[in-house]
Image (spheres, grey):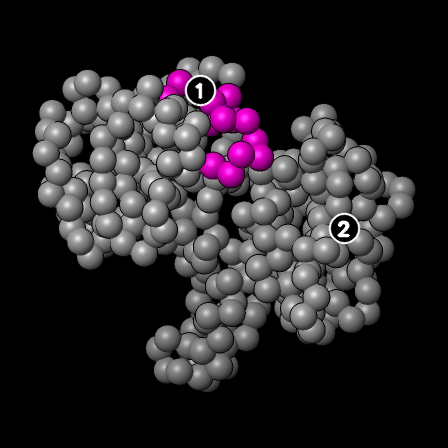
């Protein structure tokens, strides 16, 4: 498969197809209404996992009219969807939106299962495990529900006065019980970029806490008062001491681990000498396309995971997918 797009299309976590119907969230008992409607689809979030089933299976009985976008393939997965249950009203509810037929989707955040059993055996997978195999609707549901669940878990108290907060507006706002201030889900922008030298070589780095062989393109959070392009230039200069000449947008996708959005760029530089920040980087290196293919085939280097924009940025530079260089199942992904 050749990759020739000017920008990155169909990023794994940027394929949400639901209408978020934000105005509906303002109705005081909208979650109660939806959970009282047998036509509503419910998905559960347990910790960082949601339950999936092979893509050829229908969620629960009739009424699962899939669009061509959601058509199953042999290796695809689907979220397990069900009708509302009375106990759902006791959990944290999230109004995730409606599909083109007007069907509503509600996420219910529940406590993880007890015991030592492997949750994956019952189909409970993380977004990293399942995201690439989900169709657009389900990938968007998982990504949104996980991001909201992560936010609720860490914002139970008011940042202004320390009093408890409660979820309102169908799980999209938390309100302070003492002074009534409203607090909204946070998203932390981060830039991630390929840096290419005059010979077409790509700059790869290994984070200070990463294992041997795990390399990716550089990335970092955007600072207050900073444009995305300025953040690219600053991060590259700080981490490896290189000045970039040109920065061009490639694409972006949410990254709910726990609350980021990754904005992808490609940059060029005329400098090749590297001065590594040892706090951030264990090592950095330039690689040509042929060298990168050889490193993949030998297992010396591991590529980022399938749902990450990092993998797609590397493939954009490489001109082909990693899987076309090294078939799946060879242990190259981390």
Residue 34 image point, x, y percent:
75, 58
Residue closer to the observer: 188 or 46: 46
Q: Few, some or many C-alpha atoms within 10 Å of disc 2 (few <14, some 14-19, many ≥20)?
A: many
- Would residue 37 be seen by someone viewing this image from the given angle? yes
Q: What residue sits 68% from the left and 61% below the top?
A: 118
Rounded to the nearest angstrom, the CA distance separating label 2 from label 1 is 35 Å
Label number found at residue 81: 2
Q: Secondary structure at mark 1?
A: loop
| Residue 324 part of the magenta-drawn span | yes
Q: Main secondary structure of the magenta part?
A: loop
- Would residue 19 be seen by someone viewing this image from the given angle? no
- Would you place residue 135 above or below residue 150 in this image? above
The residue that mark 1 highlights is: 320
Q: Tell me which segment is drawn in magenta.
A: 318-332
Q: What residue sits 37% from the left and 82% below the top?
A: 161
Q: What residue sits 36% from the left and 42% below the top?
A: 213
Labels 2 and 1 touching (C-beta < 8 A): no
Residue 265 image point, x, y percent:
31, 32
- Would you place residue 75 above or below residue 59 in this image? above
| Residue 103 part of the magenta-drawn span | no
């Amino acid at each position: 498969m050749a990759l020739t797009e000017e920008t990155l299309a169909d990023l794994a976590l940027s394929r949400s197809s639901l209408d978020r119907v934000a105005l509906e969230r303002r109705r005081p008992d909208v979650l109660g209404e939806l959970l009282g409607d047998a036509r509503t689809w419910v998905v559960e979030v347990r910790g960082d996992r949601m339950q999936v089933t092979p893509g050829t299976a229908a969620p629960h009985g009739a009424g699962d009219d899939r669009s061509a976008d959601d058509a199953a393939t042999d290796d695809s997965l689907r979220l397990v969807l069900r009708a509302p249950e009375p106990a759902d009203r006791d959990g944290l509810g999230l109004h995730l939106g409606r599909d083109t037929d007007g069907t509503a989707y509600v996420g219910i955040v529940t406590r993880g299962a007890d015991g030592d059993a492997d949750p994956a055996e019952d189909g409970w997978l993380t977004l990293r495990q399942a995201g690439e195999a989900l169709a657009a609707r389900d990938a968007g549901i998982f990504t949104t529900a996980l991001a909201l669940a992560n936010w609720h878990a860490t914002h139970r108290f008011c940042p202004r006065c320390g009093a408890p907060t409660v979820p309102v507006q169908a799980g999209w706002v938390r309100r302070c019980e003492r002074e009534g201030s409203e607090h909204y889900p946070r998203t932390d922008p981060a830039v991630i970029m390929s840096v290419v030298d005059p010979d077409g070589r790509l700059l790869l780095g290994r984070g200070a806490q990463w294992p041997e062989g795990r390399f990716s393109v550089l990335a970092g959070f955007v600072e207050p008062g900073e444009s995305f392009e300025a953040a690219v230039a600053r991060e590259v200069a700080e981490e490896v001491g290189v000045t970039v000449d040109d920065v061009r947008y490639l694409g972006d996708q949410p990254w709910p681990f726990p609350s980021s959005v990754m904005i992808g760029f490609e940059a060029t530089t005329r400098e090749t000498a590297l001065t590594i920040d040892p706090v951030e980087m264990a090592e950095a290196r330039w690689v040509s396309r042929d060298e990168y293919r050889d490193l993949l085939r030998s297992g010396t280097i591991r590529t980022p995971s399938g749902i990450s924009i990092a993998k797609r940025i590397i493939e954009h530079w490489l001109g082909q997918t990693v899987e076309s260089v090294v078939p799946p199942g060879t242990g190259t992904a981390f």
